[in-house]
Amino acid sequence: MQTNQTIHWAIEESIKFLECATNFTIDHGQFSRQKWDGAWWHMAALYEMGEVSRIPESAIHRAKHLLKTQVWQTFIISTDDQPTSESDKMKLDCCHCELAVFYMIIMAYGCNLDEELPWIREWLLKHQLPDGGLNCEPEAYTHSQKSSIISTLPPLEAILFYTNREFTEQEAIFLDEGARYLIEHRLVCSKQNGSVIDRDWLKPCFPRFFEYDILRGMFFLAEWSRRRNKPLPVGLLLEGLERLKPSIEAGGLRVGRQIFDPQGPWGGHTFPLLQAVAGIGFVSPYLTRQLNQVIERLRA
């Protein structure tokens, strides 16, 4: 198929891009996360496609070096959290969902960040709010105490999908409370009045990077139920499937929106692989695979 040939070519282009050392040097650190054509986004697209092994090993080493040496390892909530030395002030500040995406890419590649960079997992577990979620807005920790669904999903996925041992008590609570948060919000709804918070979340998105859509939440709950041996929220997942019906056809699940909409808040330069797999109306094998896993879990 022409589409497959286009994707194959685009993967090769991303590989060449990631082999370029300058994308991870100190003076280009900020550009590595530039939306949407920075090095991290090339890696994230490959990861979400199930092609993480295609990332050049040299790029993984450089990405780890960036996390080790160029990231301020504290989420800045108060003035006490801010760097004080001139060298630390030059470091990149991260948020929960961004850091979790970086973590998942490198862990999926086969690295053990829990040994090499244990502060990342500690960061994610530390910032759960009382409602069960997280929020990348520091003010949430000092004022509203309310989470963001977008900020919550990547950290939950990072802990659920990349723990190859028994969960600690802290991790189990983190996951169960996160699942409670999603269930109480019916994946996309306000707890106050039951209305859909953002109707764009009903449109499947690929690649997601840190963005949220209803299928992402459904897949997490299905996997959480299996891995934590918890009751599957059947009614909620069936409700989610009903909401997805407009995007489902015989061949699979269609992409419903693009995170990099040039008319939206996240416009910016893109790259060939991102364009090749994100076409609106395109039946995505990657989203379809995830949808089928949710359906299989319901049947089981």
Image (cartoon, rainbow, N blue to C red):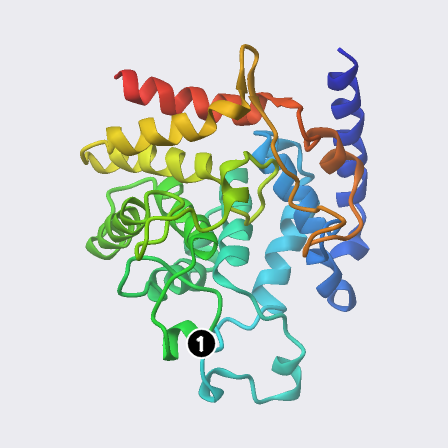
Q: Position of residue 144 (x, y in %)?
A: 36, 73
What residue is at 38 percent from the left and 79 percent from the top? Answer: 142
* Number of numbered discs on residues: 1
On screen, residue 101 above or below 29:
above
What residue does disc 1 label? 139
The correct choice, above or below, for 30 with respect to 209 in the image is below
Residue drawn at the location 64% of the way across and 45% of the way down: 259
- In this rendering, position of residue 257 left or right of residue 20: left
**Mark 1 packing: few (<14 Cα in 10 Å), some, or many (20+)?**
few
Viewer-closest of 213 and 224: 213
Q: Amino acid at mark 1?
A: Glu
- Let me know if residue 226 appears in the view: no
Q: Quadrant of the N terminus?
A: top right
Residue 62 x/y as whole percent: 67, 54
Q: Is residue 239 visible?
A: yes
Residue nearer the viewer, 174 or 215: 215
Residue at the image position 56 percent from the left and 26 percent from the top: 286
Residue 209 vs residue 88, the one in the foreground: 209
**Location of residue 260 in the rendering, given as x and y in whole percent from the top left corner:** 70, 47
Q: Position of residue 72 (x, y in %)?
A: 55, 73
Q: Is residue 230 above or below residue 241?
A: below
Q: Residue at x 37, y 25 (%)?
A: 294
Dividing the picture into quarters, in which one does residue 31 lie? Answer: bottom right
Could you tell me which quadrant the C terminus lies in?
top left
Q: Is residue 245 left or right of residue 92?
A: left
The one nearer the camera, 136 or 68, is 136
Q: Quadrant of residue 32?
A: bottom right
* Element type where label 1 sits in the image: helix
